[in-house]
Image (cartoon, rainbow, N blue to C red):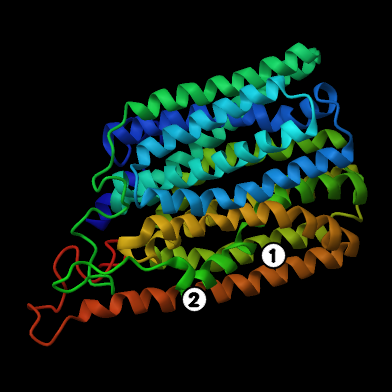
Amino acid sequence: MRRGRGTETGAGLAAQLRRPPGGRDARVMLLALCVDRTGTGVWAAASVLYFTFVSGLDARRLGLLLGVGAVAGITGSPLAGRAAERLPVRGLLIGCHLLRLGTMGLLLVAHGLATLLPAVALTSLGERAAKTLEMLFATRVAGERRGTYQALSRSVANAGYAVGAGIAALGLAVGTPNAYRALIAANALSYLLSAALVRRTREPAGRGLVVAQGDAGDDGTRGGPEGPAPAPSPWRDPGYLLFVLLDIPMNLDDSVLNVGLPLWLVHRTAAPHAVVPAFLVVNTVLVVVLQLRVSARAEGPHRAAAAVGWYGVTLLACCLVLATATGGGPWSASLALLAAAMLVTLAELLRSVSSWELAVSLAPPRARASYLGVAGMAQSVQKSVGPLLLTGAVMTAGPAGWLALGAGVTGLSLVQRRAGLRRLATLAEPAAGPPDAPEGGAPCHGQGVPPSVRT
């Protein structure tokens, strides 16, 4: 069986998109995701200029606006996870798309910071909540092949971001206020189309729960004659909270790529500024081409835990290259920075598989929705503090700052790996079964351990 899954995972991207894990519903959801990310690509490329030239914000107010949006985004993941334990995932995801449709419309008519603040905050909250709900949906429809689905979604998302950036480039080239407004309207349209596509999918079994009712397992949540015990809370689970805390630095590749590399090029190397767009090109191409291959090698929770350690080593290699990129001329600096972009993209590929797989595998089955909502906070927190860490500490310290960052992340990745393996072993302990268990001591399906932990 494992050989079959590996062969399917290693198939070509086009073939996998035609027959993704989860069948028709997964295929429609991937299309919705592509449309959503296309609009998000437009928004990411045009938002700062829109707020500057159309809304008339200065740097101080723009920083406040983006900071409030980032903080609001942190709350989106746990709120979505909590809601998904009570309401259908599909309906909640449609609601997130429609919420962002409304906030984009508000941005078109807003004229002051007081109006823009709630619009941007709700947009960020809806975006993070939507990403968590997409993960919950995939966990239900893709089952144990969720790693392959994650690889497909990453490839589709990056293609969408690239298309969105290209659309934004056309509007930015025109540069008029109406051109900027047209880009915002295009983003709003992407949310409407995404909601229509999600509506065509069927709700996963379990009425929105990540694990279908009756398949909760003996994870400490099964009750007695009076009924089932309440599902465990991630906020009272120190082991899972440790995983989420350590997962924050495991997302630093995002800030290194989008903030660290451009600023290091501009301020500390002789490379021409025209190299900066090549970072995004390298990242997009490598993710589309390699995500399936990397996911195949990190399939399953134990391989995902091993991939965390390799993440730290890869990011350390990237930091070493950046630390040595300051002494050469334009050509050598450019080549070093492009090599660093390749290394940080490889780290991103490892992280995108390991973080998601472990977030699912380390959570108790009956409460995975709320647990995954808390796990989703790691990316949001990193997006808030990562740029500050790079600009306030790493960049100030120079090459030594990059070396310290790489060494620190590598050390924490080894701690994360060991903690993840220890928790997986703890979750697998009930698999030994009671003395009178059937031959082999394995529990029946749906009892004891999450499917992703069973062998």
x, y percent for residue 422:
43, 79
Q: Which one is nearer the viewer's eye here, 35 or 193?
A: 193
The residue that appears at 66% across and 61% down in the rendered structure is 315
x, y percent for residue 401:
83, 65
Q: Earlier in the sequence, mark 1 or mark 2?
A: 2
Left or right, 416 with reference to 52? left
The residue that appears at 70% across and 53% down in the rendered structure is 384
Q: Amino acid at mark 1?
A: Leu
Mark on residue 238? Answer: 2
x, y percent for residue 449:
27, 69
Left or right, 264 with reference to 199? right
> SS at mark 2?
helix
Residue 86 seen: yes
Please say if 51 is above or below 389: above
The residue that appears at 68% across and 43% down in the rendered structure is 69
Label 1 neighbour load within 10 Å: few <14, some 14-19, many 20+: many
Q: Quadrant of the C terminus?
A: bottom left
x, y percent for residue 303:
42, 65
The residue that appears at 38% across and 73% down in the rendered structure is 424
* Disc number lying in front (1 or 2): 2
**CA separation in Å, label 1 and label 2:** 28 Å
Left or right, 280 with reference to 226? right
Q: Which residue is mark 1?
A: 316
Residue 298 seen: no
Number of disc labels: 2
